[in-house]
Image (tube, rainbow, N blue to C red):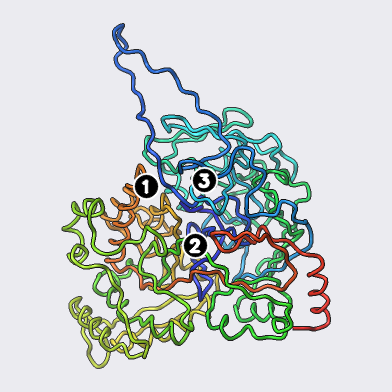
Amino acid sequence: MIAPWATKVYTGYPEMYPRNMRGTRAVLRRNFLATLPFVPGALARLPGPPIWRAADATPTAPLPPPAVTPRPSHVVTLLEKPLLPPDFPYFPYVNPEAPKGGGVTLSAIGTFDNFNSFIVRGTAPDDIGRIYDTLLRADINEPSTAYGHLAESIEIAPDHASVAFNLRAAARFHDGTPVTAMDVVWTFDTLRSVGRPFYRLYYADIERAEAVSARRVVFHLKPSPDRELPLILGEMPVLPMHFWKDRDFSKPLTDTPLGSGPYRVEAAEFGRSLTYRRVHDYWALDLPTARGQFNFGHIQVEYFRDATVAFEAFKAGQVDFREENIAKQWATAYDFPALQHGLVSKENLSQHLPTGMQGFAMNTRRPIFQDRRVRQAMDLAFDFEWCNANLFYGAYTRTKSYFSNSDMASSGLPEGAELALLEPHRAQLPAELFTAPFTLPVNNASGNNRENLMKALALLKQAGWEVKERKLINQDGIPFTFEILLDEPAFERVSLPYVQWLAHLGIEARVRTVDPAQYQQLINAFNFDMTVAVFPQSDYPGNEQAGYWSSAAAKQEGSDNLMGVADPVVDALVGKVITAPDYDSLLPAVHALDRVLLWNWYMVPHWYLQSVRVAYWRRFGRPPQKVRSGLAFEAWWVDEKLAEVTDQARRAGME
């Protein structure tokens, strides 16, 4: 499961900052910077008892079983047992005595024009999620589990027909107003009715929300074997109903937003900079789910339209911390005086998380990409080995699954339970899916991929295209031409060689780089031919798969189904994933879904990295414990002694 509202973080998707990584693609993989409170990682669903239905009300009818009252719990878990007991003092990866105060300056690529990140219109800041709290909050080292945050306790009905959250009496918005059950109900109803299209899919199995009292909210669930719904609800940010009372939620917000989280918006210059101030009387300061975190007194985010300028700002000491997503820069550009003098540190932090899929995504709403053979030809034309050797310094591994770097990735031939799921759809699937393992083309890194280009040309010919006068045309004489839409110049160095390889097939491809705001508008409207898309995955996939691949999502403007996947087989397999009663059922369902997506060639897969590359000015303290995600920046703090040395050197001009 992946939080649909989470702001952008990047693990395993190097070489660019993908603006289309919003909605579910804007996934929290390691709570990086955004201090997002909850992203459960695993959804190993547990079977529940059947719903009892009474027999005819006759004297001889058996008496109904006695009502079972749900036991309040401090945690929601889909594993056998949570790692932390009810009285846990803090998450294991934090320093509970971390000093508070000081400031950090970060950089962001792109722009923002409003604060409402929950709607399609406008562009909100990447990390606005830091001002909000959620009902539950996760330990980033523990998949499939979340602990009570706004909610003091959680009660799940034995028949899974409802889940209740009991709010903490101390919970407050920044203006001192209590967080109530009505705020939770209003948030849920509003997100589902006027929020991004994804919310309607994500909350489809939730019938309604009811405020039973000021501090108790009950969600009534539709009959469904989906056991992740309590976690899905727990990740929902709770918004202040009174703040939005006289505002239109469907429109961009330029007023200073109100939340209940550890930070508030202090100042903003739209498109240029944004400053968050730590809430000194944060209501959850001493809760185990917050202790030792959110230590910076203020966080300033400077926005840059160009990644090169952002890097120069870091070198000059105008930015304190950065995550590097470009292999060439990591290998060659970090040789400047501040690093040589020990004022800047550079580290590879190992991470052990699923890396999902990044690649060139083809919009099948466009006629030229509706033939599977054409899409496969697009992949054959891409020379990953040349890119890795000449552009990436051999840093990356080719992505071969939509669930890469995890047990959920398919491999070999389908067999057993997976084959049983695919067999009813055999007539609708490529015959090769059942007879050959899925493989990607491999080249020798020389740049001469003639053999695979010839295979691509043969597929294009089968699909009705032929080369005439060095141009690929169809039977109507229409040339094969399309545009690769980007929002970041850094990715042009991959796209332009790809354009040259496509030209050998007679295909005229163009690269167009637009500003982030225009890019977002075009993506929301599906007004593109090809772009770079990112589909992150969690340890245990769940409801977000419907937003990625379902036919319903393909029809909803602003949804996450960028490629326009509208396949009844995919719909059926997505249903199997979402309703899998346990891990043993989930695994073959995801394998089957992965295999069908791969064999339909919706994307030209890129690559992934099994570490997080970070560089920072030496002014921070951090806990020594390692985390699965590689980085838990929300647990860092400003070390006054280190900061004094570093800041003095920066003032003296040491760059």
Q: Report whether residue 224 is seen.
A: yes
Q: Earlier in the sequence, mark 2 or mark 1?
A: 2
Direction from residue 204 to residue 377 in the image, left or right: left
Question: Of the numbered discs in the image, which one, if any, rests on residue 352?
Answer: 2
Q: Is residue 330 above or below residue 614?
A: below
**Identity, as a three-letter code, of the amino acid under mark 2:** His
Q: CA distance from mark 2 to mark 1?
A: 20 Å
Q: Earlier in the sequence, mark 3 or mark 1?
A: 3
Direction from residue 546 to residue 97 in the image, left or right: right
**Identity, as a three-letter code, of the amino acid under mark 3:** Thr
Element at label 3:
strand
Question: Of the numbered discs in the image, which one, if any, rests on residue 145?
Answer: 3
Q: Position of residue 328 (x, y in %)?
A: 53, 83
Q: Is residue 33 above or below residue 485?
A: above
Q: Based on the displayed image, in which of its 4 quarters is residue 152 positioned?
A: top right
Q: Position of residue 145 (x, y in %)?
A: 52, 46
Q: Based on the displayed image, in which of its 4 quarters is residue 410 positioned?
A: bottom left
What residue is shown at x 33% (from left), y 19% (from top)? 54
Q: CA distance from mark 3 to mark 1?
A: 15 Å
Question: Of the numbered discs in the image, which one, if any, rests on residue 583?
Answer: 1
